[in-house]
Amino acid sequence: MKSLVPMTEHAALLPLDHDARARSAFAFTLRNLVTSRLMPGTRIVYDRRAAARFTAEKGRAPQSPDDIRAAMDADPWYRFYLSARRASQELIWQGLVAAAEAAPPPSPPPPAGGSLVLDPEVEAPAYVDAIDIHCMPGGYLQDRGPDDLGAGRIYDRGVHVYMSGLMGPANDAVGRLAARFLATRLPHFRPGRILDMGCGVGHATLPWAEVWPDAELHGIDVGAALLRYAHLRAESLGVPVHFRQANAEATPYPDGHFDLVTSSIVLHETSSRGLPRILAESRRLLAPGGVMLHVDQPRFEDDDPWATFLQENETHYNNEPFWRRYRRADLEALARDAGFTEVELATLSADVVRQSQNNAPDDPRAKSRGFLALLAVAP
Ligand SMILES: C[S@@+](CC[C@H](N)C(=O)[O-])C[C@H]1O[C@@H](n2cnc3c(N)ncnc32)[C@H](O)[C@@H]1O
């Protein structure tokens, strides 16, 4: 039986007692069972009965992801798979919520030189506020008072189980991938100031300090409890980061303040109104010659309809309302509309992103395509 790799210890990490560990281990095992045993069966029932039933009813074979969904929706195996998948997702969070409520406050780590500025006047956009994204109870914004770390503590541990530990002990695989990609793609680039938008608990913020240790590192998010956790985590790991509560659509920084504006797995959670605003804000914040790098899920266009159908379950059954639209968006055109002229899309491929969510590692038909990087240089 697989077991979860231990997480990197730091001052803010949610301590788990025996029961909480057992709950987490159960959620992890169930999730693996769902992806490695139940998920491959969905293709078998599609090939053996659901596609034929669709063809008999409609007089044509299913072609698009929506056709496949129509063919599969009533299939009992598929419904069982969906229910088990949703239950495993909810169990991941539930065990952690109980642990976070019981956990003592952490001891403050020795200062590393970073800072935290919270601003209760910041209004979170509806796409963050209105729904508990990927079923995390209370969502990103839950904040129970000036010392609350709950959302951060739950998110950090939860992501680790959710991704079956594939993001590494510090959940930072995407950030490391992005930082290494940019350092290789632009070997002469030396950013003085870096901004990570939608930094959450800082998983993808800290890796920039490994590549450019002399850069001043900033992270913004709308979630106060996430940022408190991010600050403690970064200080405890010895990385100076300046965290601030701000909306990435309209930040308080002056024009041209940064040399690099980046984000990791944020854009797919923003609305079709929010996304262009974040790109326009990235453009405004960049000094001439500055670089924008947003890294997120790849487009659906090259996927086969089966893989797209499975991936779209995130929107249908995992509280990811914008996932489906984001993965069809023309990011290059959106970046040009935001005022960038040099725009490039690159695939950051890595085995680390053979995701636990929909892509069973054992099923070669459900391929992971890594992450997509939207790279642009400010004129
Ligand atoms: C999936 S999490 C990713 C967190 C982090 N970037 C990472 O790689 O782990 C998305 C984050 O984006 C934040 N977010 C979404 N829209 C935002 C906005 N308009 N302004 C600031 N933060 C935003 C959410 O609060 C959440 O913390």
Image (cartoon, rainbow, N blue to C red):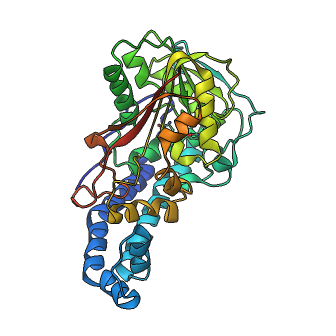
| Residue 354 horizontal/vertical position (percent) | 29, 48
Rendered position, 291 above or below 360: above
Left/right of residue 169 with respect to residue 86 in the rendered view:
left
Q: Residue at horizontal 40%, vertical 87%?
A: 58
| Residue 219 horizontal/vertical position (percent) | 56, 26
Q: Residue at horizontal 61%, vertical 16%?
A: 256
| Residue 234 horizontal/vertical position (percent) | 49, 23
> Given the current orientation, which residue lies at the most extreme bottom position?
56
Q: Quarter-wise, where is residue 337 in the image? A: top right
> Given the current orientation, which residue lies at the most extreme right position?
121
Ligand 1's quadrant = top right
Residue in front for this viewpoint, 25 or 257: 257
Rendered position, 105 above or below 193: below
Asked whether the viewer can see residue 56, the reply is yes
| Residue 272 horizontal/vertical position (percent) | 61, 49
Left/right of residue 282 with respect to residue 20 in the rendered view:
right
Q: Residue at horizontal 35%, vertical 62%?
A: 30
Counting labels gives: 0
Asked whether the viewer can see residue 16, the reply is no
Q: Quarter-wise, where is residue 113 in the image? A: top right
> Given the current orientation, which residue lies at the most extreme front position?
341
Left/right of residue 330 with respect to residue 139 in the rendered view:
left
Q: Residue at horizontal 33%, vertical 82%?
A: 50
Residue in front for this viewpoint, 228 or 96: 228
- Image quarter where the N terminus lies is bottom left
